[in-house]
Image (cartoon, grey):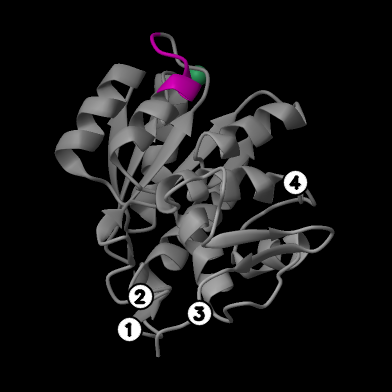
């Protein structure tokens, strides 16, 4: 796999250890020791995956995550020493795609990273372009690109996965549990409500009015469904 991973970690020893492990797997590694460096480097080098430690000395990791999400949909895997579940969920709400709690095994980190890289690149292969609601929503699977009202909308891999699931059968109601399972490779540990945060973020990106959603409808007691009909 020709992939570039950026590691954001202030502890040099850990950073070098992760780097050597990834390089041993044939993955190119960029590294950043601070949040500021991470943001600059992501702008200039556009890695395929960012591994972000939340405990950074200059800018808190959460702020780095928010900042990165302002301009990129690069998958982000968060490293956290905090074991509180609320921290994990918060990381996901801010747009992380997965997280690993320290201490972790480098093997697990590489496996999870590979799963994310595979998911973000392989998802494009099966279908081509799908249009809904007279072109109001268009998914280009080959390019992994979404247009809402003609405008390209950058999505996180998780948001993309949710939209792919919902559009696979317009009108069908998907429970939160089903959606979790459809977003492949996602280690959820049963937090069904986390889906709600992702749906909320997604609505802000693609709906004309996120308070009155017409693309992703909530079905009381059921889950979510695509409110637009397929144009095909
Ligand atoms: Ca740290």
Q: Which residue is drawn at 47% across and 66% down?
A: 119
Categorize mark 4 by other alpha carbons within 10 Å: few (<14), some (14-19), many (20+). few
Q: Is residue 83 above or below residue 20?
A: above
Residue 20 placement: quadrant: top left
- In this view, 110 is above or below 171: above
Q: Residues within 10 Å of mark 3 (few under 14, many from 20)?
A: some
User: In the depicted view, which residue is nearer to us: 66 or 138?
Assistant: 138
Residue 3 picture location, percent across and down: 29, 58
Disc 3 versus disc 2: nearer the observer: 3
| Whether label 2 touches label 1, CB < 8 Å | yes
Of 136 and 109, the residue lying toward us: 136
**Mark number, residue 229:** 3
Q: Name the residue carrying label 4.
A: 193
What residue is disc 2 on?
Answer: 141
Residue furthest right in the image: 221
Q: What element carries label 3?
A: loop
**Eyeballing the image, is 167 above or below 206?**
below
| Residue placed under numbered mark 1 in the picture | 128
Q: Give the range drawn in magenta.
A: 58-63
Q: Does the magenta stretch include residue 36?
A: no
Spatial CA span between label 2 and label 1 = 5 Å
Could you tell me if the residues under marks 3 and 2 are in contact, i.e. CB atoms within 8 Å? no
Disc 4 is placed on an element classified as loop
Q: Earlier in the sequence, mark 4 or mark 3?
A: 4
Above or below, comparing residue 136 to residue 39 in the picture: below
Q: Do the residues labelled 1 and 3 touch (CB within 8 Å)?
A: no
User: Considering only order in the chain, which callout, 1 or 2, is on the residue closer to the N terminus?
Assistant: 1
Q: What element carries label 2?
A: loop
Tag 4–tag 3 contact (CB < 8 Å) = no
Q: How far apart are marks 3 and 2 (CA)?
A: 18 Å
């Amino acid at each position: 796999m020709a992939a570039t991973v950026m590691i954001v970690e202030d502890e040099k020893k850990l950073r070098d250890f992760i780097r050597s492990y990834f390089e041993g797997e044939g993955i190119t590694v960029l590294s950043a020791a601070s949040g500021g460096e991470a943001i600059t480097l992501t702008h200039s080098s556009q890695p395929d995956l960012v591994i972000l430690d939340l405990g950074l000395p200059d800018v808190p990791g959460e702020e780095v995550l928010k900042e990165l999400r302002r301009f990129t949909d690069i998958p982000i895997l968060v490293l956290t020493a905090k074991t509180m579940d609320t921290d994990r969920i918060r990381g996901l709400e801010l747009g992380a795609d997965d997280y690993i709690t320290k201490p972790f095994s480098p093997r697990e980190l590489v496996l999870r990273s590979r799963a994310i890289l595979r998911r973000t690149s392989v998802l494009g292969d099966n279908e081509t372009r799908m249009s809904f609601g007279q072109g109001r929503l268009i998914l280009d699977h080959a390019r992994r690109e979404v247009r809402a009202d003609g405008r390209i909308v950058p999505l996180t891999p998780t948001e993309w996965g949710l939209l792919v699931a919902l559009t696979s059968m317009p009108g069908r109601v998907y429970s939160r549990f089903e959606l979790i399972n459809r977003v492949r490779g996602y280690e959820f540990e049963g937090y069904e409500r986390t889906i709600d945060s992702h749906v909320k973020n997604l609505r802000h990106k693609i709906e004309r009015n996120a308070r009155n959603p017409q693309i992703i409808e909530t079905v009381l007691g059921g889950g979510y469904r695509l409110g637009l009909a397929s144009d095909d």
